[in-house]
Amino acid sequence: MTARILASTCALALCAGAASADYSLTILHTNDFHARFEPISAFDSGCSAEDNTAGECFGGSARLVTAVQEARARSNNSILVDGGDQFQGTLFYTYYKGAMAAEFMNLMGYDAMTVGNHEFDDGPEVLRGFVDSVSFPMLMSNADFAGEEMLADAIQKSVIIERGGERIGLIGLTPENTAELASPGPNVTFSDPVAAVQAQVDALTAQGVNKIIVLSHSGLNVDTRVAEGPTGVDVIVGGHDNSLLSNTIEGAKGPYPIMVGDTAIVQAYAYGKFLGELNVTFDDNGVITEAVGEPIIMDASVTEDAASVARVAELAAPLDEIRNEVVAEAVDMIVGDRAVCRQMECSGGNLIADAMLERVADQGIQIGFMNSGGIRANIDAGEVTKGEILTVLPFQNTLSTFFVSGQAMIDALENGASQHEDGSGRFPQVAGMTFTVDLSMEPGSRISDIMVGGAAIDPAATYGVVSNNFVRNGGDGYAMFRDAENAYDFGPDLADVVIEYMQAQGPYTPYTDGRITMK
């Protein structure tokens, strides 16, 4: 695939009025970057300098800098926007928090960004520091943050920018369940995305704006619902579920763009692997008459900006000693890809759940339980570094042990399978138990054949569980764990537990064994 392929996906009825249109705009976009300032491999894990030189790596800030410059040169009018989740994912975020993302986004000249759930991972204070460091507006329409002094005067619901003599309205959208996914604190509440977007569309329209773009960190299913609901939305730039939309790439979730009525929906996967480039033509009334484009892959054909390469290397220097330490060995690749782990049993999930259970098995704990959203990358075969483990488990979660009823565990598994279609991170990876998921059933009635230690689960019995502190405290919808008995949330760091487990195993052979059956 070449960088400049532009395939029209607009309906014929939409394209018919192109001759009378008088305004064109190129929308450049990224989403779910997750601190991947350095190039990544084909499997979204770390990529060595040697492999990068050999042309086998993708992404990295230095390629994005070049690609943005080249795309702007192709367009008479352009904007650069982000669909959220710049935060979290590598040691760069652990060390620098939002400062490094702010530096490179300012360098590239972003026009706006929506707040993703991971922007709240370290609470409102760190998000406020990021907002104060960037030279563009941060947007979030479906949240009430007036009661949070750190954010009350920092984030806007929508904004109007001007490009080529035309005014463009931009609206931000954050996951409605962010309180379950991150740590926004008690003073920020989230609301229905459709109603929130419509309110901002009405406000912008009242100011005479007829070109409206939603920056949505909410996933493709929600974006489709938003497109069907509000009137007046022209483009939705998505994020959150790492959807690749493309007209040329096999396995893409849909065309680029997806048209829902007159609304164009785009998304560009994640991790800086693509730069989205949507070329939109509007008629005099602000209605889209043509929407064409294709995500540009950040492969070796995109030259890395030399100054950015040097700056990333400079910022990486303090991290090298930590991440280059070899801590284990893997016989084969350990799968942590969200496309697998959020859908079914995966070898990375088994590793983590096994490691957790092994660590506390002598404490009366029978079940290891890990949310797939906490598993962030594959690990390649061969030497395993601490940096790779920390990329897989970047959240600094601690081991939590607690005791709940069998019914609570049944409820937990139902929660885990309830949003399977959305690729939700609540999908569980387990140890010490087996179960079946039947996706033909309605959410809430999908789980059967639950066995714990080889025996059928007893709803009235009490079971010891080990998980991470995020899940134990209700994250990813696991509210049934909040009132668990004898809960202790201050165990060792989950990454350290996995490292020690792998070291005890010797060369580790990843595996799946049918502990989760999918129907």
Image (tube, grey):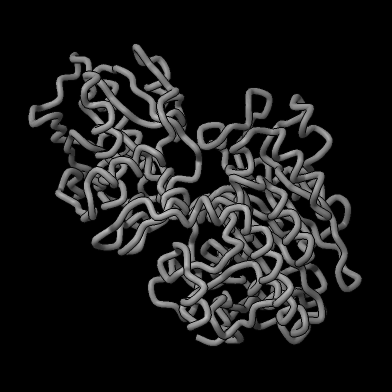
Residue 327, above or below 311: above
Quadrant assignment, res 5: bottom right
Q: Nearer the viewer, residue 383 or 212?
A: 383
Asked if residue 407 lies left or right of residue 389, the reply is left
Quadrant assignment, res 106: bottom right
Residue 303, above or below 42: below
- Where does the image place residue 61, in percent across and percent down from the top left? 64, 67
Q: Nearer the viewer, residue 114 or 170?
A: 114
Please say whether residue 151 is visible from this viewpoint: yes
What residue sits 77% from the left and 73% below the top?
Answer: 78
Residue 164, above or below 311: below
Asked if residue 350 lies left or right of residue 178, the reply is left
Quadrant assignment, res 363: top left
Q: Nearer the viewer, residue 111 or 265?
A: 111
- Where does the image place residue 27, in percent across and percent down from the top left? 70, 70
Residue 8, above or below 430: below
